[in-house]
Image: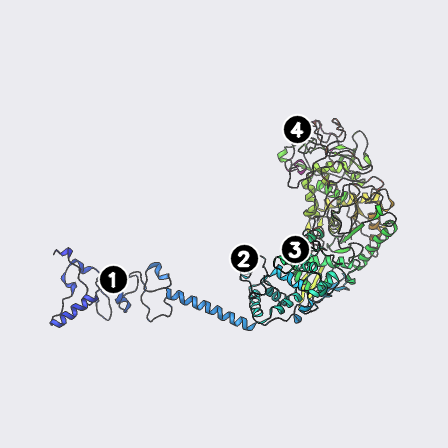
């Protein structure tokens, strides 16, 4: 056989064959020659001399080398030969062989099945041990010893106690026999239909809550009645953390294993929070129906089970102080009815209620006044609600959640001045008693309401409010968002925008028009002509997408100024609240800038109307009285804006929890703000607001009335205090469907109501007393500002109606806020008059188009207006304001979520 086909010899002592050869040689008395001595090519294969005790060992195969390495004769990885790339065997056997020393490459890092199995057993064993320890350490809660609400104490600004409230309806424990079977069935059907069969926990609900916590989202509570009972009872720790959640799980397991199901259900119904300060079913029955729990019928039980989902959004009385948009009376009523009906249906489905009984309850049961606590009567209830809402809505700053506030134990120091609150209430009541006679004039004097607020310009502190006749009878806080439009009290924002940004250059490049602006002087001239055809900043007639024009009417169909051009300066236009001048000024500046001016001053964007139509400048928006007072306070403070707030400090047994820190923004330069103030003083000295004059004090302010005479305002200020007063007619009966603001023609035995009448009278009476004892302060004397615009007629031009500024909202009717189109559109031809050429008259369209003609007598509003909410205004020299007032408030607390 040739050499290259010969089987390679095995190394000495290697393998079973070598062993047999050794035995054969031993028996024959001959020693086998080492295979490496033959000199064959195979001799070099696997040869590896090792220094081990001075001996050289040669291995003829990889298997032999591996076995030798395992016996300790191999070299460390990195050397040449069969041991390359492999870890040396440990000096002594390891308990955990990882990384694995006898594997190459990635296999070294793959745990063996023994290791994987051991780790799993260890992990689950430790979990069982931890669960056992946790189970042993937790105790079953006792409802009577936990979850007891305390009072919150509210203080006036001077530190004297206002009221202690919040814990007046502490829980009253009742036995399960005293809880109607229908209530038990309603809760089980709606929340946990397998209550009597489950172990007390819901693994899927737990996993969902843990997942939400892990990603930083809102946690979801336990979904079984047992878990909810445990959560309610563990009120000493309401933090949403892993530690608390796991503790809740252990307690739930222990409760489910050791407690009777009836006891758990009894504990849950006695510990749950039903809103209105009521903990437990007995307190809830009293709070909503003024009866004992045992007397509740099936419909009332289904309703209370709905309230358990969250009283803020299911109490028919609403909670607008916490969520003005989502927790209205209408929204809560609809939500509660839907949930109640769903509960009743489920009771029938699960054979806990017969269909005949269920058919009797298709409407919400009648609930009683949510403020039965007489300590909250008068204005106190509104003040408490305002302070509570401020704390909850600013929970990131205060560190106090709604649930924590309900538990009580806080001392809340408010900004409210008892003297000013009482003086404001007295001033409103005086006007009401002397002029409003609902018994004598039911057609005109019913549903009359007032609202008011005072804000300190130096700090933003809300020092007084008037929320309504009585917080225990009238539940809506009229100082907060009501939906009443503000009318011509909005015009100062148009003026401020013109002075801050300026009007757009009519002769400039339309693309660069935003940058090519001229800041206006108070001496700038604008047309006071009645039925003025409103033009774009470039001189083209304003048109909507249907080609309809806007003709602006003034109060009483009167023109201001001297014919034929009727030009008046902006001071006179503000003095007599000339609509046509300010609508044109708003378009020249750009309604986007007018809106920005209002927001900068302190109004919330959520309370502002759309800017699709020129009437935006006339007050179609509906900010709250608090926000209007705070906004005008920005002018009083020379352009420094501070958000209104109602809580200075909150303390608890652990010390100070929250202290308010005033933040100031420079909304306008002092030059702009002081010039606006100077012009507004003319309104009070010799304009529509003369009723608001105060002896020996400088006053700046503005009247406002809306179209249809549906709301009237006066907002004014001195250097020390800014106050807003509103008046409107709105049905207080929440059972009336589709409630709307009512006209005030004939109200108070007057032809019509204007901001210059009752609102300004209330303002003056209140401010006279509120400022008594304070030294009068003058307003700053402003330096001249801007340039005189329109002092001479502009050259005639022939602009195209399509050449409009891209960023002008009024030229873009197809914005995101849809508006109702005019009822009688009349397309017109392209205007051929030059920019600001008020002497130029195109063919009269007879008052048709977006502006329409005045069909309301002395109503200064734009009739046939593009939307039901678009309003015009305003006053003649005798104090007549007009506008359009038909809105449903969409603002938040103070017109928004803060303050």
Q: Secondary structure at mark 2?
A: loop
**Around disc 2, counting alpha carbons within 10 Å, would you say few (fewer than 14), some (14 to 19), or many (20 or more)?**
few
Query: In this rendering, is residue 70 above or below 711?
Result: below
Question: Between tags 1 and 3, which lies in front?
Answer: 3
Q: Is residue 803 magenta?
A: yes
Q: Is residue 851 left or right of residue 125?
A: right
Q: Quadrant of residue 849?
A: top right
Q: Observer-nearest residue: 43 or 470?
A: 470
Q: CA distance from mark 3 to mark 2?
A: 30 Å
Labels 1 and 3: the sequence-earlier one: 1
The residue identified by callout 4 is: 800
Q: CA distance from mark 1 to mark 2?
A: 53 Å
Q: Secondary structure at mark 3?
A: helix
Question: Between tags 4 and 2, which lies in front?
Answer: 2
Q: Is residue 413 left or right of residue 220?
A: right
- Which mark, residue 215? 2
Q: Residue 373: x percent and y percent? A: 77, 62
Residue drawn 79% across the image and 54% down it: 468
The residue identified by callout 3 is: 339
Check whether the beta carbons of the residues at disc 3 and disc 2 lie within 8 A of each other: no
What's drawn in magenta, residue-wise?
Answer: 790-819
Q: Secondary structure at mark 4?
A: loop
Q: Residue 511: x percent and y percent? A: 62, 34
The residue identified by callout 1 is: 62
Q: Quadrant of residue 60?
A: bottom left
């Amino acid at each position: 056989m040739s050499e290259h086909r010969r089987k390679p010899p095995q190394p000495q002592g290697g393998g079973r064959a070598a062993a047999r050869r050794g035995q054969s040689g031993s028996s024959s008395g001959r020693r086998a020659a080492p295979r490496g001595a033959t000199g064959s090519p195979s001799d070099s294969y696997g040869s590896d001399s090792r220094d081990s005790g001075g001996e050289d060992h040669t291995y003829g195969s990889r298997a032999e080398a591996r076995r030798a390495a395992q016996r300790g004769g191999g070299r460390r990885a990195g050397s040449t030969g069969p041991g390359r790339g492999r870890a040396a065997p440990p000096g002594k056997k390891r308990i955990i062989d990882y990384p694995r020393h006898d594997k190459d490459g990635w296999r070294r890092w793959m745990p063996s099945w023994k290791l994987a199995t051991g780790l799993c057993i260890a992990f689950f064993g430790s979990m069982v041990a931890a669960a056992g320890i946790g189970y042993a350490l937790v105790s079953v809660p006792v409802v009577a010893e936990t979850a007891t609400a305390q009072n919150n104490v509210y203080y006036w600004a001077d530190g004297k106690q206002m009221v202690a409230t919040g814990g007046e309806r502490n829980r009253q424990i009742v036995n399960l026999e005293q809880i109607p079977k229908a209530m038990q069935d309603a809760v089980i059907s709606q929340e946990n239909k397998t209550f009597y069969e489950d172990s007390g926990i819901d693994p899927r609900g737990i996993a969902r809550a843990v997942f939400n916590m892990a990603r930083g989202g809102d946690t979801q509570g336990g979904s079984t009645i047992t878990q909810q009972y445990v959560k309610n009872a563990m009120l000493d720790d309401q933090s949403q953390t892993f530690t608390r959640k796991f503790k809740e799980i252990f307690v739930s397991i222990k409760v489910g294993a050791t407690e009777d199901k009836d006891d758990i259900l009894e504990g849950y119904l006695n510990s749950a929070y039903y809103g209105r300060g009521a903990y437990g079913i007995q307190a809830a029955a009293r709070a909503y129906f003024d009866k004992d729990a045992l007397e509740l019928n099936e419909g009332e039980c289904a309703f209370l089970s709905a309230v358990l989902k969250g009283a803020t959004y299911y109490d028919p009385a609403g909670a607008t102080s916490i969520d003005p948009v989502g927790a209205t009376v209408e929204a809560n009523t609809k939500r509660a009815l839907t949930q109640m009906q769903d509960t009743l249906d489920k009771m029938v489905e699960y054979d806990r209620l017969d269909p005949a009984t269920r058919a009797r309850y298709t409407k919400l049961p009648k609930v009683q006044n949510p403020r039965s606590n007489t300590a909250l009567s008068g204005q106190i209830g509104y003040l408490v609600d305002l302070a509570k809402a401020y704390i909850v809505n600013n929970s990131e700053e205060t560190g106090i959640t709604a649930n924590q506030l309900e538990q009580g134990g806080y001392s809340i120091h408010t900004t409210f001045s008892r003297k000013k609150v009482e003086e404001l209430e007295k001033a409103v009541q005086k006007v009401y008693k002397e002029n409003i006679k609902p018994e004598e004039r039911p057609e005109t004097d019913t549903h009359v309401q007032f609202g008011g607020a005072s804000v300190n310009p130096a700090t933003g502190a809300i020092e007084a409010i008037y929320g309504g006749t009585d917080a225990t009878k009238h539940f809506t806080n009229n100082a907060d968002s009501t939906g009443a439009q503000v009318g011509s009290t909005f015009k100062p924002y148009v003026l401020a925008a013109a002075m801050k940004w300026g009007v757009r250059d009519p002769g400039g490049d339309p693309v660069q028009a935003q940058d090519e602006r001229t800041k206006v002087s108070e001496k700038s001239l604008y047309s006071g002509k009645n039925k003025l055809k409103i033009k774009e900043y470039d001189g083209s007639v304003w048109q909507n997408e249907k080609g309809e024009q806007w003709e602006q009417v003034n109060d009483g169909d009167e023109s201001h100024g001297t014919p034929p051009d009727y030009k008046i300066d902006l001071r006179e236009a503000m003095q007599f609240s000339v609509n046509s001048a300010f609508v044109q000024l708003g378009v020249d500046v750009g309604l986007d800038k007018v809106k920005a001016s209002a927001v900068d001053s302190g109004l919330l964007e959520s309370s502002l109307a759309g800017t699709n139509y020129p009437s935006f400048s006339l007050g179609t928006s509906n900010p709250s009285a608090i926000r209007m007072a705070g906004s005008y306070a920005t002018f009083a403070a020379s352009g420094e804006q501070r958000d209104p707030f109602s809580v200075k400090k909150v303390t608890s047994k652990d010390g100070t929890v929250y202290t308010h820190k005033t933040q100031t923004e420079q909304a306008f330069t002092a030059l702009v703000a002081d010039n606006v103030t100077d012009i507004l003083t003319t309104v009070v000295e010799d304009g529509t607001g003369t009723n608001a004059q105060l002896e020996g004090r400088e006053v700046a302010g503005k009247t406002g009335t809306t179209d249809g005479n549906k709301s009237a305002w006066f907002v004014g200020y001195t250097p020390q205090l800014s106050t807003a007063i509103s008046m409107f007619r709105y049905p207080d009966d929440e059972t009336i469907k589709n409630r709307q603001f009512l006209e005030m023609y004939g109200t108070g035995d007057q032809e019509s109501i204007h901001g210059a009448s009752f609102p300004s009278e209330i303002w003056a009476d209140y401010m006279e007393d509120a400022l008594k004892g304070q030294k009068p302060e003058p307003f700053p004397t402003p330096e001249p500002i801007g340039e005189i615009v329109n002092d001479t007629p502009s050259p005639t031009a022939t602009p195209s109606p399509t050449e409009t500024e891209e960023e002008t909202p009024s030229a873009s009717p197809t914005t995101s806020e849809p508006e109702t189109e005019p009822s009688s559109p009349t397309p017109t031809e392209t205007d051929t008059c030059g920019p600001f050429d008020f002497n130029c008259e195109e063919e009269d369209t007879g008052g048709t188009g977006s502006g329409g003609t005045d069909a309301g007598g002395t109503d200064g509003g734009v009739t046939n207006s593009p939307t039901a909410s678009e309003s015009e205004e305003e006053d003649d020299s005798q104090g007549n304001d007009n506008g359009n007032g038909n809105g449903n408030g969409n603002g938040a607390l103070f017109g928004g979520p803060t303050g």
